[in-house]
Amino acid sequence: MAKYLEGTEQQKSRAYSPAVVTEGGRIVWLAGQTATVDGDGKDISGNFEAQTHRVFALIDQTLRRAGGTLANLVTMTVFIKEPRYGDRFVELRKQKFPDGNYPGSALITVTNFARPGMEIEIQGIAVVGDRA
């Protein structure tokens, strides 16, 4: 069972929960996920928005293999290269969690990533199964 603690108006506007309380279920620790090609193999290096959509899709695919979905994500750490994309990331995250049950989150700006062209990396923790 997951309980999303209601956030302040500012927290809601930034599309994250101040805390998510879980009981039962299995914890899935997700490795950091990046993408420089889309689902069709097209190069998306340097394209923040395309990479963000692809990273969320890859996280969802991984969670489905573990018996869950993106909705089971309870916390995420997001690394972006350009601070100017922070607000755009929030808008994209809102699309991925339309029910308003946002994971807890940290958004961190980094100088660079391990490979050229990467703009974003997301790692997270999910709780799947035994959720009422």
Image (cartoon, rainbow, N blue to C red):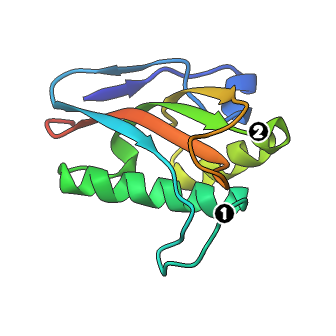
The residue lying at 25 percent from left, 49 percent from top is: 68
**The N terminus lies in which quarter of the figure?**
top left
* Rendered location of residue 98, percent (x, y): 55, 52
Q: Quadrant of residue 4?
A: top left
Question: From the viewer's perspective, is 96 left or right of 23?
Answer: right
* Rendered location of residue 58, percent (x, y): 41, 58
Question: From the viewer's perspective, is 108 left or right of 96?
Answer: right
Question: From the viewer's perspective, is 85 left or right of 42?
Answer: right
* Rendered location of residue 2, percent (x, y): 32, 28
Can residue 15 be seen at all in this image of the molecule? no
Q: Residues within 10 Å of mark 1 (few under 14, many from 20)?
A: some
* Rendered location of residue 50, percent (x, y): 64, 64
Instruction: Residue at the far right: name it.
Output: 84
Label 1 – label 2 distance at C-alpha: 18 Å
Q: Quadrant of residue 25?
A: top left
Question: Which of disc 2 and disc 1 is earlier in sequence?
Answer: 1
Q: Nearer the viewer, residue 5 or 117?
A: 117
**Up/down of 86 relative to 18, above or below:** below
**The C terminus lies in which quarter of the figure?**
top left
Q: Nearer the viewer, residue 61 or 39?
A: 39
Q: Which mark is residue 86?
A: 2
The residue lying at 37 percent from left, 55 percent from top is: 60
Q: Amino acid at mark 2?
A: Gly
Q: Which mark is residue 34?
A: none
Q: Nearer the viewer, residue 96 or 53?
A: 53
Q: Amino acid at mark 1?
A: Ser
Q: Which residue is mark 1?
A: 45
Element at badge 2?
A: helix
The residue lying at 69 percent from left, 59 percent from top is: 49
The residue lying at 39 percent from left, 49 percent from top is: 70
